[in-house]
Image: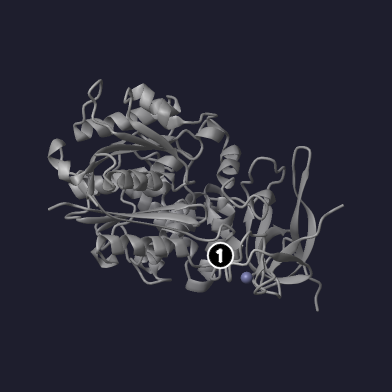
Amino acid sequence: MRKVGIAGVGHTKFGRSEVSLVDMLALAALEALDDAGIRTGRRHGVDQVFVASMGAGILNRQSSVASALVDTLNLQPAMAETVENGPASGASAVKLGYMAIASGMCDVALVVGGELMRVVTGWEATDFVATMLHPDAEYAYGLTLPAFAGMFTRLYMDKYGVTEKDLAMVAVKNHEHAMHNPVAHIQLVPSFHAIIEDEDAPVINPYVAEPLRVYDVCPVSDGAAAVVLCAMDLADRFRKKPVRIAGIGQATDTHVVAEREVPTDLLAVRLAAQRAYAMAGLKPEDIDVAELHDAFTILEIAISEEAGLFPKGEGHLAVRRGETRVGGRIPINTSGGLKAKGHPLGATGVSQIVELVRQLRGEAGGRQVEGARHGLAVNFGGFGNNVVATILSKEE
Amino acid sequence: MEPGMYAYRCTACGKLFHPARAVCRECGGREFEAVPLEGEGTLLTYTRVYALPEGYMKPWLGFGIVEFPNGVRVSGQMNTEDLAVGMKVRATVGTVKEGVGRDYYGFIFEKAAQA
Ligand SMILES: [Zn+2]
């Protein structure tokens, strides 16, 4: 198989988009193509396009988005597909781009993830996201992702001693990281005291799904992110030295959350990460920076453990010791994470990879992890029933 | 008439599932028989949700995961404000969501009577 790298990255400012879904995707795509130094127009250099979107059909009443993106960018006759894998659509699309190049089918693939979510109300968005749950055994009850995250958090607190303060520390850390990321949705750091210790904390930071509060949950955001994938044997065609995709792992778990044998385990995360490490020939100790799917603060802690960065049940202790902040032993969610950067579903997996590329290139500004060589991204679909882990390595 | 709630037992190996599946995870069997899921169970975890999805006209709703004595675990709504991990609950079947043209039935758990 050919080695595959990332030659260019692009990312819109997450938050509220002023333009349509396809125009937003195009903004991220053009930034990534320009970053790679790839020509547009009649003799463009893109063989294949993958677009990740979970909600275009439901939220925007638009299908075949990849074809529409090819048209507006005038990338014909490039091959094109839209990829839907819930909130893990982005990393799935990158995986498919990797496969397209590794197989020898093409040389250059443009992967764009995006979601235009703020066209509906908050409760419509919550309902839409819940459509990925089991239709009869979960969705029909009014169960949502926050509900499962709340029930998971209670189990984690009882079993491992995680506290609401630990969760608030994750939130504050990620908001602090986002202050150094110009494309993050939320550019404001909440006071730890105000959201968890103060007597007014229950008003400022009320429960959403006990024991999770407002500041434990990611915002609803619009946004798009893009990467240009290339065969490493063509690396000298591009403006910058490509960052190599060293490993990709993916795994599924039971759709029905209640059926999991050990309800505090996220087996699909564990297996996806193990597969990615094996493919990369790396161990968790080799990872210098990680983007983990913190749609809820508890998930950053649980995923950090399942991905082998800390022993099971000890992720919150690492948070207390400051090991997961920039400057710590293994900085997590330097971009601000889903919590502060935002979580436009289809964009998220691509956005995580954009952040790792910026870190490994040394382009991360005030949030740079010095000397980062290997980065891990975990993109979490469903309530952990379809998870993609991606490892990037800096080419020496 | 409100339908009952069932687990589905693999006729080859006896493994129980809820909801129904096409293939048994243990043995690959494809035939199942319905077994009523009723009576008392144990509350494993719960939450109160204050931001409900579209279609619910309530300020909050309780949800839980309950284990029946036969080992089957299910999610359901909680019809009691008095919630604690490990408490005994009793399964009832009721309207969990009012839909357009049809209602959805499912588990609504109540606090079990003291033994
Ligand atoms: Zn069986």
Residue A83 relative to residue A212: left or right: left
Q: Does mark 1 have its CB less than 8 Å from ligand 1?
A: no
Residue A21 in sight here: yes
Q: Note whether A229 is above or below B63 in the view shown.
A: above
State the residue at coordinates (56%, 66%): A260
Above or below A391: residue A45 = above
Check the image and report above or below for B25 versus A234. below
Q: Please name whichever residue, A74 or A326, is drawn nearer the observer in this view of the structure.
A: A74
Position of residue A334 measured from the top left corner of the image (x, y, whole percent): 31, 50
On the image, which quarter does residue A343 sit in?
A: top left
Residue picked out by circle 1: A154
* Quarter of the figure with residue B7: bottom right
Residue A100 in the figure: left or right of residue A244: right
Q: Residue at x 16, y 55 (%)?
A: A371
Chain letter of the residue carrying label 1: A
* Residue A265 % position (x, y): 49, 67
Kind of residue at badge 1:
Arg
Q: Can I make out residue A9 in this image?
A: no
Assign ligand 1 to one image quadrant.
Answer: bottom right
Q: Foreground: A75 or A228?
A: A75
Instruction: Name the foreground residue: B34 vs B13.
Output: B13
Residue B104, how many percent across, how many down?
75, 48
Q: In the picture, residue A235 is in which quadrant? A: top left
Q: Secondary structure at mark 1?
A: helix
- At 33% from the left and 28% from the top, the residue drawn is A27
